[in-house]
Each structure stands twice: as C-alpha cells, then as structure tokens.
Amino acid sequence: MLLSGVLTDQYVESAIWDACATFSEARQAASLNAIKGYCRQITTDELIAELD
C-alpha cells in the first residue's frame, strides 16, 4: 500500500502516510521520527527506482 498526504504531524501521522510535508523542518522530523517504527520511509526517488 502506498499513501501520501500533507501535514505530517497531524493527519498523516495517524495514518502512517509517506511523501509528506508540514509547516517546518522540525515538525516534519519529529513526526517522521514518531512513525518510523510503523512504516518504511524512503524518498520519492528511491520509490521510483524500486517501481522501475
């Protein structure tokens, strides 16, 4: 399953979404750190390479 969204530390975090953004780098980092045990986190370029 692949999901994406916006406002990582609010809506996305609760659904373990990927490819996201929020209002600041600090909020983004904190949210990604909080969900790192629940999902695999890769960059868009890494995902594209895997899909190719």
Image (spheres, rainbow, N blue to C red):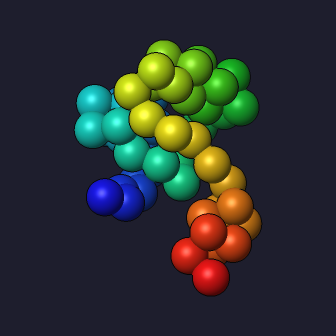
Q: Residue 36 appears at what percent x and percent y?
A: 51, 25
Q: Up-down: is 14 above or below 18?
A: above
Q: Residue 29 appears at what percent x and percent y?
A: 65, 25
Q: Quadrant of residue 26?
A: top right
Q: Is any part of residue 27 visible from this angle?
A: no
Q: Residue 37 appears at what percent x and percent y?
A: 46, 21
Name the residue furthest bottom. 52
Residue plotted at (60% across, 31% down): 28
Q: Residue 45 appears at what percent x and percent y?
A: 72, 66
Q: Up-down: is 9 above or below 48?
A: above
Q: The N terminus is located in which quarter?
A: bottom left
Q: Is any part of residue 23 visible from this angle?
A: yes
Q: Residue 34 versus residue 38: which sits nearer the camera? A: 38
Residue plotted at (57% across, 41% down): 41
Residue plotted at (62% across, 82% down): 52
Q: Residue 31 versus residue 52: which sits nearer the camera? A: 52
Q: Quadrant of residue 33?
A: top right
